[in-house]
Image: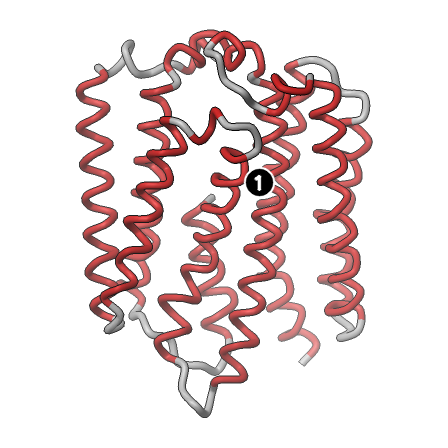
Amino acid sequence: MLAFMQVLFRYAFLKQQNIPLALADWQYGLLVLSTVLLAAAGYVVNDIFDVATDSINKPNKVIIGKEISETRAYNIYIGLNITGVAIGFYLSNVILRPSFATLFILIASLLYFYSTSLKQIMIVGNFIVALLLALSVIIIGIFDLFPATNAENQAQMASLFSILIDYALFAFMINFIREIVKDIEDVNGDYNQGMNTLPIAIGNNRAAKIALGFAVIPFILSLLYINEYFMQNKLYIATLYGFAFVLAPLLYFIVKIFTAKTQKEFHHLSTVLKLILFFGILSILIITLNIKYNA
């Protein structure tokens, strides 16, 4: 989904605008690859530290210690990180901003500290994961828009960057809620490992109510956004899409989490949020097509 999201923003959105872009297609491919490698490294190190928890929460999905050894997993983790950061370092030099390479080191470091300690701290771990997903949207603007900005196109570039920020914010909110729901789903294994996640601290019911409260925020903001930018600009196809594939599933989530009790129900709601995120990101293609169709 990460790669799909970044490719979609480049080719369904930025490439359709009459603007210069800093990276060549193959260089943008490297940016996507770098992001995916760092995310993969994050998953590997998370699985290494989560063996005991996953043995309780999802015993059928435990790989480390069964299919591959912990030593080999660490080697894979180091290899993925070195490659991801090296690509980031190369791209930072391509756009003549070598200091931007620190961004890739920061992502790799945050993913490591998330797995080792941050995820055990109530809300902080959820925030970090959601922030990193949002950053994978913003990084497109940092590497593709910002270096190609000049005095003539500054206003247009700022407008396009602000749209990326809007989507990053949407991705952040949905993923943040999803992380809370996943914590509720995994409460038994997390409790046995002495973690202090939100449902452990305040109970499943209260944590679910907080997730519900947070879900109302993107619902209202998306409603206002659709009215302000889609309806006002007569983008009726995008408006219908927004109502059918973002607002309706969000409303379904809000209603369902109110009564959810079992692990199976919370897993279902986690999947619903993943689909909302997917269709929310896909809306950039629908908007671009709608604008072309109207023109």
Q: Please name the residue shown 63% across and 51% down the image.
A: 280
Q: Which image quadrant for residue 212?
A: top right
**Residue 284's x, y, as percent?**
59, 61
Q: Please name the residue shown 44% across and 9% down the image.
A: 59
Q: Choose between 124 and 259: the one closer to the eye.
A: 124
Q: Which image quadrant for residue 80?
A: top left
Report how many numbered discs are placed on residues in the image.
1
Placement of the C terminus among the 4 image quadrants: bottom right
Q: Which image quadrant for residue 51?
A: top left
Q: Is residue 270 above or below residue 189?
A: below
Q: Choose between 93 and 269: the one closer to the eye.
A: 93
Q: How is the image coloured?
A: secondary structure
Q: Residues within 10 Å of mark 1 (few under 14, many from 20)?
A: many
The residue to which callout 1 is attached is 175
Q: Amino acid at mark 1?
A: Asn
Q: Please name the residue shown 65% across and 16% down the image.
A: 264
Q: Is residue 10 left or right of residue 99?
A: right
Q: Is residue 244 above or below residue 92?
A: above
**Residue 228's x, y, as percent?**
77, 68
Q: Pick out the residue farthest to the bottom.
A: 152
Q: Please name the residue shown 61% across and 30% down the image.
A: 180
Q: Is residue 255 above or below residue 9?
A: above
**Residue 77's x, y, as percent?**
24, 32
Q: Secondary structure at mark 1?
A: helix
**Residue 223's x, y, as percent?**
79, 56
Q: Is residue 5 left or right of residue 242?
A: left
